[in-house]
Amino acid sequence: MANADHVARLKQGPAAWNARRAENDIAFVPDLHGADLSDADLNGADLRDANLRGASLSGANLRGANLIRADLSGANLSGAYLSGANLICADLSGADLSDADLSRANQSGADLTCANLGGASLRDANLALHT
């Protein structure tokens, strides 16, 4: 299960969350796996390297969020707003991205194996593979 303190801090909003990340940048590894963050406002949140495996983020606002190397495998991101999000090298394998807004998102090097992208908006998204 997710770390309850991490979930509580994240639910306080992106400003409080990003301040926590800045305080303990090196030692802090967000453990949010399996957390229910449906419809949460995480606009611009720094979630790099976060464990969000199996989390529910349906309808969440993740516009401009930093999700570099985040583990989102098996996560529910249906209807989430990820416009302009940075998903470089993120693990989205088996994630439900149906009806998600991924416009202008950078998914370069992301693992989209078995991800559900049905109805997702990929307008101007970067889906390049890293070599």
Image (cartoon, rainbow, N blue to C red):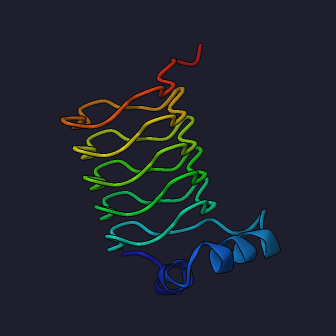
Task: Point out the image quarter for the N terminus.
Answer: bottom left
Q: Nearer the viewer, residue 25 or 11?
A: 11
Question: Residue 15: image x %, image y %?
Answer: 67, 75
The residue furthest left is 118
Question: Residue 98: image x %, image y %?
Answer: 22, 43
Query: For the point 47% across and 70% down, which residue is it?
Result: 41
Q: Nearer the viewer, residue 105 or 7?
A: 105
Query: For the point 40% across and 53% down, which residue is it?
Result: 81
Query: For the point 41% across and 39% down, which residue is it?
Result: 102
Query: For the point 57% across and 54% down, which residue is it?
Result: 65
Q: Nearer the viewer, residue 10 or 14?
A: 14
Q: Nearer the viewer, residue 46 or 1?
A: 46
Left or right: 24 in relation to 91: right
The residue furthest top is 131
Left or right: 48 in relation to 96: right
Where, by quadrant of the figure, is residue 123 drawn?
top left
Where, by quadrant of the figure, is residue 85 drawn?
top right
Q: Is residue 60 above or below residue 130?
A: below
Task: Point out the image quarter for the C terminus.
Answer: top right
